[in-house]
Image (spheres, rainbow, N blue to C red):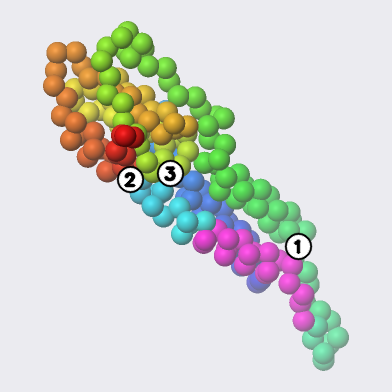
Amino acid sequence: MSARTGMFASIGAIFSAILSSACCWLPLSLMALGVSAGGIGAWFERYRWEFLGATGVLLGLAFWLTYRRRPCCEDAGTCAPRSPRWTRIMLWVSTVVVIAFAAFPKYAGALISPKPSPVAAQGLPTIEIRVSGMTCEACAVGLGEALEQIPGVADASVDYEHATARIVPTPGTKLDESRIDQTLHELGYARQPDAP
């Protein structure tokens, strides 16, 4: 019974780890399918530490249930059987998967590269703002996509390393900059004041 419970705890740990990094991989997956990521990533980012905590608890429970010392029955002189070997193997596989998903924001930048900004390269006027709240390169990609959806924006690119967004207004239109702040807020980011 405890081996089965340990397996369920391992599966739960994997599921929690997947959810803990969904702020990064889910918007990227949706963008690859042509679906706007909107505020989905921001919602998962808000609860990232809770998901990571649940992951740690479930993984710890799985290890405890799998490797704990089973008591011997004094009357019969027999001990409860150890967890099957495949359960222990699956626990270690689960641990590797958990680490890979939990650490995804740290290596997401190596998997993606920010798109070049062809419109900005044409010498059009740009608006450059400082952004706080991004936690990985995937945040920058999702934010850039969201900024491009604002009416009056011809192009947008976000630089995670420098925490800046470059926005190119559509020529001949007036861009309502409050929409930029609203989009940042909806995604869980904030516009930082320019340095003096």
| Magenta highlight range | 53-71
Q: Residue furthest top?
A: 122
Depicted 128 relative to depicted 55: above or below? above
**Which mark is drawn over residue 188?**
2
Whether residue 168 is visible: yes
What's the distance in space between the residues labelled 2 and 3, CA to CA?
A: 11 Å
**Which mark is drawn over residue 23?**
3
Image quarter of the N terminus? bottom right
Along the viewing direction, whichever of 20 and 30 lies nearer the viewer: 20
**x and y percent of residue 20 in the render?**
48, 50
Residue ID at (31%, 26%): 128
Depicted 1 relative to depicted 48: above or below? below
Question: Viewed as shown, does residue 21 lie left or right of 164?
Answer: right
Which is more N-terminal, label 1 or label 2? 1
**Which mark is drawn over residue 56?**
none
| Magenta highlight on residue 50 | no
Q: Amino acid at mark 3?
A: Cys
Residue ID at (32%, 8%): 122
